Amino acid sequence: MRAMSQLSNGERIHLVDQKGRHYALTLKAGETYQFSGQTIAHDALIGRPDATMVTLSRGKKMLALRPTLGDYVLKMPRGAQVLYPKDLALIPMWADVYPGARVFEAGTGSGALTMALLRAVGPRGLVVTYEMREDFARTALQNIDRYMGPVPNLVSLRKNAYEGIELLDDGVPFDRVVLDLPEPWQVIPHAAKALRSGGIYESFVPTVPQVMQTVEALERTTVFAMVETFETLLRTWSVQGRSVRPDHRMVAHSGFITVARKVEAGLLDFVSRREAESEGTREEASANMGEESSR
Ligand SMILES: C[S@@+](CC[C@H](N)C(=O)[O-])C[C@H]1O[C@@H](n2cnc3c(N)ncnc32)[C@H](O)[C@@H]1O
């Protein structure tokens, strides 16, 4: 990610109007940006500080800024549907993607999750991403390059993840496997082999039958424990003087995230017995406190 404080030639920036709407443009010296019959020369933006107020030809004021990753993914060119920022925020945390980690991802789609993973692994980590469609992969790589610049620690391959996950030439297993594709259960047997013990599997799917097939496949491998599925609902608020209330609209559904931990062969019985016992203890504790056990 470029760290300069001034907007520079060739950079993707956003103009933000008073209602908070974003308009993306790539700065090119000598060109002119047109907006609702008003114009501004790119040269008037190049060299200005990040997050500066600019005035268009007929007086419209807009904020010119470098987009956050969340803003950028919502406006970048798309091949496949991108993940929403609310899910992009959760996925690296729940997969515990750490600086230096080696992560396998499929499919690349438009590259939104790839960028979130690259940020989380940092320059010492590695992301290997599979995408079957050449056109989607090309768009994704352009999106990533435009936002992050060159990323030597990204390996982008035109491969079908349902057919297998290949380790790189050094034979080192992956620390994390993160999937956003229609049938993750087809990848799970491969993830079971490609992950190191203690590694984390995580997938995102939009529907309940997909979750069921995912969890069944995780259980079938007999090496995944601590399987958890959840979704996230983000409700934004309107705060204007004394009128403070939730916004009328929200994204009510995006998808379900399933996470599991790869354990050493033979440990699974122990882990599931311990989980069942602690569930029992929690229920007993709630009953003793006179609470509902299912909250
Ligand atoms: C929903 S999109 C992923 C979006 C991506 N997470 C993002 O945020 O931009 C799913 C992608 O998986 C790819 N895909 C589907 N099946 C695949 C497979 N078996 N192997 C690799 N990629 C696959 C599709 O072509 C598509 O681009």
Image: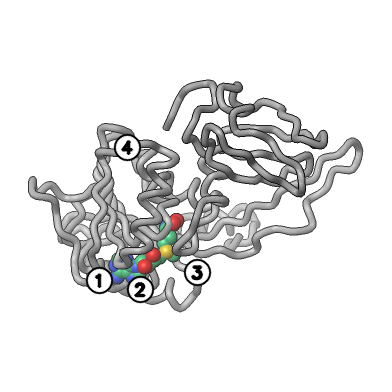
Tell me the amino acid under the disc marked 4: Pro
Percent position (x, y) of residue 16?
69, 39
In front: mark 2 or mark 4? Answer: 4
Q: Which of marks 2 and 1 is nearer the N terminus?
A: 1
Q: In this view, does 157 lie to the left or right of 68?
A: left
Percent position (x, y) of residue 90?
48, 48
Residue 281 picture quarter:
bottom left
Q: Is residue 112 left or right of residue 200?
A: right
Task: Using the image, tell me which numbered label, if any, was put on residue 206.
Answer: 3
How many marks the image carries: the answer is 4
Q: What element carries label 2?
A: loop
Q: Earlier in the sequence, mark 2 or mark 4?
A: 4
Q: Report, in whole angstroms, how far the alpha carbon at label 1 lies from the one at label 3.
A: 18 Å
Whether residue 111 is visible here, answered yes or no, is: yes
The reply to whether dot 2 and dot 1 touch (C-beta < 8 Å) is yes
Task: Using the image, tell me which numbered label, if any, was put on residue 162.
Answer: 1
Decide: few, some or many residues near mark 1? Use Cα within 10 Å; few <14, some 14-19, many ≥20: some
Point 25% across, 73% down: residue: 220
Which residue ends up furthest to the bottom in the rendered image? 209
Decide: few, some or many residues near mark 3? Use Cα within 10 Å; few <14, some 14-19, many ≥20: some
Q: Report, in whole angstroms, how far the alpha carbon at label 2 lies from the one at label 4.
A: 31 Å
In front: mark 4 or mark 1? Answer: 4
**Quadrant hosting ligand 1:** bottom left
Task: Using the image, tell me which numbered label, if any, was put on residue 150.
Answer: 4
Q: Earlier in the sequence, mark 1 or mark 3?
A: 1
Point 69% across, 52% down: residue: 235
Residue 194 picture quarter:
bottom left
Q: Does the residue labelled 1 lie within 8 Å of ligand 1?
A: yes
Q: Report, in whole angstroms, how far the alpha carbon at label 4 lies from the one at label 3.
A: 32 Å
Q: In this view, does 33 lie above or below 132?
A: above
Query: Label 2, on which residue?
Result: 183
